Image (tube, rainbow, N blue to C red):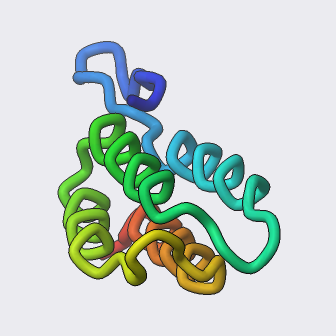
């Protein structure tokens, strides 16, 4: 989970989750090599991210990606890169 950041002395702390997940995504993106990745490894990465980050938006995107992982044994890295892009967008704070 992200590092707790105090927002005020008399208020609860919040996690800096967008920065933490973007750091994780950068590591995963840097590890992409070639045209194909092992499907089981990608599923493991997505499950690890799901356990580490509890944001409902991120969890929903991960659940959708898990249900859509293509291939039987390998996945094209173009799909994996797009999945990481979607997660990065989901991690961005929303301003209303």
**Left or right, residue 18 beside residue 50:** right
**Left or right, residue 70 beside residue 28:** left
At 32% across and 73% down in the image, what residue appears? 65
At 46% across and 69% down in the image, what residue appears? 73
Residue 72, how many percent across, how many down? Answer: 38, 76
On screen, residue 45 above or below 16: below
Q: Nearer the viewer, residue 79 or 14?
A: 79
Snapshot quadrant of residue 85: bottom right
**Left or right, residue 61 beside residue 39:** left
Extreme residue in the front direction: 73
Q: Nearer the viewer, residue 90 or 41?
A: 41
On screen, residue 1 above or below 93: above
**Left or right, residue 25 beside residue 70:** right
Residue 13, how many percent across, how many down? Answer: 31, 24
* Quarter occupied by the N terminus: top left
Snapshot quadrant of residue 95: bottom left
Q: Nearer the viewer, residue 72 or 17?
A: 72
Extreme residue in the top direction: 9
Q: How many marks?
A: 0
At 65% across and 77% down in the image, what residue appears? 77
Residue 70, how many percent across, how many down? Answer: 39, 83
* Quarter occupied by the C terminus: bottom left
């Amino acid at each position: 989970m992200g590092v707790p950041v105090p927002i005020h002395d008399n208020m609860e702390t919040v996690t800096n989750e967008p920065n933490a997940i973007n750091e994780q995504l950068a590591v995963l993106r840097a590890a992409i090599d070639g045209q194909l990745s092992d499907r089981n490894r990608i599923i493991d990465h997505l499950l690890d991210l799901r356990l580490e980050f509890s944001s409902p938006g991120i969890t929903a995107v991960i659940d959708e990606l898990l249900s859509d992982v293509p291939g039987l044994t390998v996945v094209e890295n173009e799909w994996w890169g797009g999945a990481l892009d979607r997660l990065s967008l989901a991690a961005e704070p929303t301003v209303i």
